[in-house]
Structure formats: structure tokens, C-alpha cells
Image (cartoon, rainbow, N blue to C red):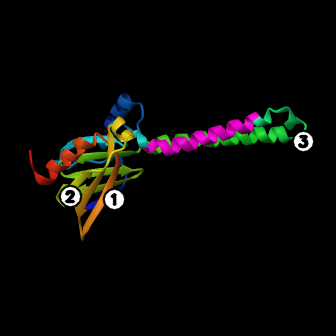
Amino acid sequence: MEQSTPHRNETNSEQAEDTVALSGDQSIPDTPSSNYFSLDEDEELLWEGREGPKELVPGLLCSLLFVLAGGAVLRISSLETVGEGPPNAQLLLIVLGGVILFVAVGIAGYTYWSHRKKYYAVTTKSTYRRRGDYISVIAMTDIVIANLESRSPLDKFLSSGDLAIKWQEDGEKVTTYRSVPDPETVCDLIAKGTYGSD
């Protein structure tokens, strides 16, 4: 069964201090599972990893386009012909260019921040996918099979890939985990958990 639950940070103060000491970032620890979900007593964490860097590309490209646009506007504002135009035209172009560059920084920052809050985990009982403040869970007993989809040259270079997890609950469903790091290992772990093989 796939379940979505709001993010709840249940760590105590001692655990929070350990996270800060290890990662320097209390809200986004290097080992997300320790702060974002708790395991059952008979459940063991087998693997976890953050979403691959390929998912950063669209946001960073968008940010780059804004940087180029802002730079072009600032370049135009420095032309002598602009100073001969309407009053305050040069100042307005400088402000416009600055705003565009500010937006570019905001897009890049948000892209990185949101990427840091996306990760996957596999345990002896379930697979977990975190997106922002929500975690979706698929029980191993519900999984039919996990397939590694076709990988692009970029996926292979980054050692990542998309996993299509077929599972059953009131009918057959497919959930795709995108840009999973070391996807072959994750497929093997899910297969072992699903079929109980060694």
C-alpha cells in the first residue's frame, strides 16, 4: 500500500545536535531517514540516497537564461545611446537588469533547496520516497516488480536511473522513482525484499 504522510521530525535534542555536528545543516541532514521517518523495531534500513543531480538541470538552465537576459539588459543600459534617450531610461534598465538577475538567483536557490529535500530509502519492509514535506510508502508485500527504465548517456554518466515500481492495491499501479542513484543496487534490494531471496 502506498501511503503519503506529512513530514514529522521526531528526533530528540541529542539527535539534532549530532545532525548539526555531522552535516552543518539541521533541517537537511546527510542521512535523511534518521530525521524524517522512524523504523519499526523489526525493520532495517538497507539503502538510502538523494535524487540524482540530473533533476537540477531544468531549473539551472532556466536560471542561466535569466542571467543572460539580465546581463544583456545591463549591457544595453551602459550604451551611450541610452543616455541620450528619455530621462531615467538608463536607471530603469539598470533596475530591470538587477531584478532579472535577482530572479535568476532565486530560481537557482529554490532548485537546489527543493532538490535537497527529495530522497529515496529502501528498508526490509517498504520503499520510501520523500518530496518536500510528504513521504510516500510502498510496502514490499504490495510490490509486484521493480524495473530499471532505459537510461540515457547522462544517466549512465551520473550513475542514476528511473525505476518503475509495479504494485497492487485495488488493482495494479505503477509508481516511478526518478533519478535514483545506483539504480541496479536498488532494484536488487527491492527484488530480495519482494521475493524473499538471498
- Residue 158 appears at what percent x and percent y? 36, 36
Tell me the residue at 43%/44% (across/down).
55
Whole-Å distance between the Cαs marked 1 and 2? 16 Å
Mark 1 or mark 3, whichever is nearer to me? 3
On the rendered structure, is 115 left or right of 43?
right
Q: Residue furthest top?
A: 21
Asked if labels 3 and 2 touch by Cβ distance under 8 angstroms, the answer is no
The one of 94 and 69 positioned closer to us in this rendering = 69
Q: Along the polypeptide, which appears first: circle 1 or circle 3?
A: 1
- Magenta residue span: 55-75
Which residue corresponds to mark 3?
87
Mark 1 or mark 2, whichever is nearer to me? 2
Q: Quadrant of residue 93?
A: top right
Q: Residue furthest bottom?
A: 170
Q: Along the polypeptide, which appears first: circle 2 or circle 3?
A: 3
- Residue 95 appears at what percent x and percent y? 75, 40
Whole-Å distance between the Cαs marked 2 and 3? 68 Å
Mark 3 residue crowding within 10 angstroms, few (<14) / some (14–19) / many (20+): few
What amino acid type is highlighted by mark number 1? Ser
What amino acid type is highlighted by mark number 2? Ile
Would residue 146 be seen by someone viewing this image from the given angle? yes
Which residue corresponds to mark 1?
4
Q: Along the polypeptide, which appears first: circle 1 or circle 2?
A: 1
